[in-house]
């Protein structure tokens, strides 16, 4: 997150009004609701995770144990179980 000096962008009257509530503190101003992006929207992480999960499921179908998958993908066995369950549901609903 980048910080911008208030004096560089805000009128002095507004700065004085803000100082009545917070004097010398850092204040976070959130984006407008319509400007917010969903998690993973800026990167390809959702696509990468979907591909990884599909590979985990295919490995599972090929007979690899949850323990092997957990070690291969650096995940907990519970996470592997969850991913397999989600992939089964996803493929059964298609």
Image: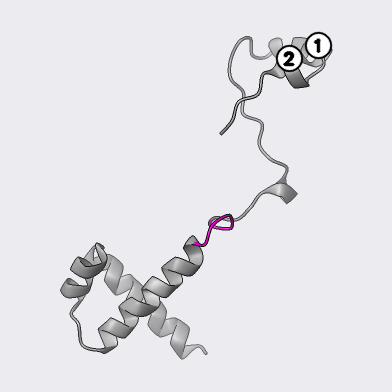
Decide whether residue 48 is among the magenta residues. no
Earlier sequence position, callout 1 versus callout 2: 2
Local secondary structure at mark 1 = helix
Within 10 angstroms of label 1, few (less than 14), some, or many (20 or more) residues?
Answer: few
User: Which contiguous range is marked in magenta?
Assistant: 40-44
19 relative to 24 in the view: left or right: right
Q: In the picture, residue 3 is in which quadrant? A: top right
Q: In the picture, residue 19 is in which quadrant? A: top right
What label does residue 7 carry, if any?
2
Which is more toward the observer, 38 or 52? 52
Residue 17 spot, x, y in % from top left: 77, 13
83 relative to 36 in the view: left or right: left
Name the residue located 81 percent from the left edge and 11 percent from the top edge.
12
Total numbered badges shown on the rendered structure: 2
64 lies above or below 42: below
36 lies above or below 73: above
């Amino acid at each position: 997150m980048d910080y911008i000096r208030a004096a560089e962008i805000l009128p002095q009257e507004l700065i004085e009004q803000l100082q009545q509530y917070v004097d010398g503190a850092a204040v976070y101003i959130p984006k407008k609701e319509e400007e917010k992006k969903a998690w993973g929207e800026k990167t390809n992480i959702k696509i990468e995770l979907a591909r990884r999960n599909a590979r985990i499921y295919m490995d599972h179908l090929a007979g690899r144990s949850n323990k092997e998958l957990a070690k291969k993908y650096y995940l907990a066995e519970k996470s592997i179980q969850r991913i397999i369950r989600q992939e089964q549901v996803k493929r059964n609903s298609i």
